[in-house]
Amino acid sequence: MYFILFKDTAGYWRWTLKASNHEPIAVSSESYVRKTDAEYGISLTKSAHNAPVHEANAA
């Protein structure tokens, strides 16, 4: 897996996490004015590997 860090068409920073087959797995849910903020979002995603998974109840 790897991250792609890029500027969108509005000039804001975004990231995409891609699988080894180059298909997107996750994308930033927001855009960032500063590159360092986008990089921080990537670091939060990387550190979430031990986060618990909760199943949502169907409505």
Image (cartoon, grey):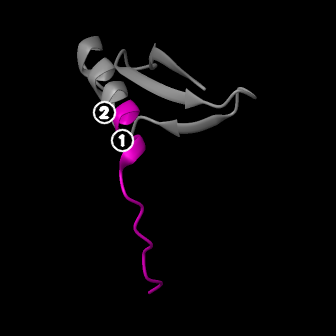
- Report if residue 25 lies within the magenta region: no
Percent position of residue 36, x then y: 25, 13
* In the displayed structure image, the side of residue 35 where residue 17 appears, left or right: right
Q: Is residue 4 above or below residue 55?
A: above
Which amino acid is tagged 1? Ala
The one of 11 and 48 positioned closer to us in this rendering: 48
The one of 23 and 47 positioned closer to us in this rendering: 47
Q: Which residue is drawn at 37% across and 58% down?
A: 52
Residue identifier under label 2: 44
Residue identifier under label 1: 48
How many marks the image carries: the answer is 2
Percent position of residue 8, x then y: 45, 20
Q: In which quarter of the image is the C terminus?
A: bottom left
Disc 2 on helix, strand or loop?
A: helix
Q: Residue at x 69, y 33 (%)?
A: 23
- Report if residue 50 lies within the magenta region: yes
Percent position of residue 1, x then y: 60, 26
CB under 8 Å between discs 2 and 1: yes
Mark 2 surroundings: few (<14), some (14-19) or many (≥20) residues within 10 A: few
Q: Residue at x 53, y 30 (%)?
A: 17
Q: Residue furthest front?
A: 50
Q: In this view, does 38 lie above or below 45?
A: above
Which amino acid is tagged 2? Leu
Q: Residue furthest right?
A: 21
* In the displayed structure image, the side of residue 18 where residue 42 appears, left or right: left
Q: Give the range drawn in magenta.
A: 45-59
Q: Residue at x 36, y 14 (%)?
A: 11
Q: Which residue lies furthest to the bottom in this view?
A: 59
Q: Residue 26 carries which label?
A: none
Percent position of residue 24, x then y: 62, 34
